Image (spheres, grey):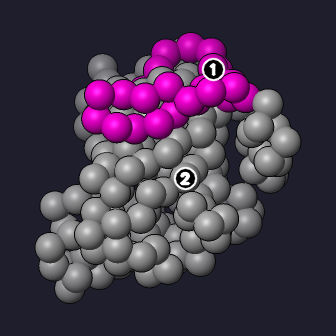
Amino acid sequence: MLPHGRLVFISAWQQSPQLSLLFGCLLGLSLLGCRSGASAPASVADTPPLDSAPVIAARSAPPTREELAAAGPFSHTSSGLGYRVLVPGSGNKPRSTDRVRVHYHGWLDDGTVFDSSYERGSTTTFALDGVVKGWTEGLQYVSPGGKIELVVPPGLGYGSRAMGEIPPNSTLHFVVELIAINP
């Protein structure tokens, strides 16, 4: 299992493991600090009214293999991202600059689970432009309450660098449940 927050390393940090480790520690502390107490948004105009930002109760477990198998074929973007919308959700879709709260489950081609907020029992919140490119691109296909399965090729994931239990040049698989935008 990767420590909480390890998925938020951006591709630019892949060239220096020391910077990645420092960034991960700082980001993890930042995420923990965001959990208690509210901070003011950068601009009041950027904050949607409470009624326009639906918050959906999160599941306590990822979808089963049977649920995923029944979801139909994958679509592919020009960047190589594979995705299939399992549940579209409702309301606005996130932009690449939004913060999102999600539940997710990640595994490798061989089925090895490398990270899961479901297994930790808590959602996670992050800036959508601060995660692997496959997430930034893929989460823009669903609205709050939505769920998407992503197949992230190495170029949109961690590339040629190993990340914890993730070997270099790995294709990453995720089911991501979008709980809220700009929580």
Q: What residue lies at 28% left-to-right and 63% top-to-bottom?
A: 159
Q: Amino acid at mark 1?
A: Pro
Confirm whether the magenta stretch covers residue 60: no
Q: Residue furthest bottom?
A: 18
> Which image quadrant is residue 52 in?
top right
Q: Measured along the vertical axis of the image, is residue 151 above or below residue 122? A: above
Callout 1 crowding tier (Cα within 10 Å): few <14, some 14–19, many ≥20: some
Callout 2 crowding tier (Cα within 10 Å): few <14, some 14–19, many ≥20: many
Query: Horizontal and vertical percent for residue 5?
Result: 46, 67
Tell me: 59 left or right of 142: right
Tell me if label 2 and label 1 are in contact, CB under 8 Å.
no
Point out the stretch of residues depicted in magenta. Answer: 71-94
Residue topped by disc 2: 173
The quadrant of the picture occupied by the N terminus is: bottom right
Confirm whether the magenta stretch covers residue 82: yes
Query: Horizontal and vertical percent for residue 42?
Result: 26, 37
Query: Horizontal and vertical percent for residue 20?
Result: 25, 76
Tell me: 132 left or right of 17: right
Q: Earlier in the sequence, mark 2 or mark 1?
A: 1
Q: What residue lies at 28% left-to-right and 74% top-to-bottom?
A: 161
Tell me: 7 left or right of 44: right
> Which image quadrant is residue 182 in?
top left
Q: CA distance from mark 2 to mark 1?
A: 19 Å
Q: Measured along the vertical axis of the image, is residue 53 above or below residue 28? A: above
Q: Amino acid at mark 2?
A: His
Magenta stretch prevailing secondary structure: loop
Residue topped by disc 1: 88
Q: What residue lies at 38% left-to-right and 44% top-to-bottom?
A: 134
Query: Horizontal and vertical percent for residue 175?
Result: 62, 45
Name the secondary structure under disc 2: strand
Name the secondary structure under disc 1: loop
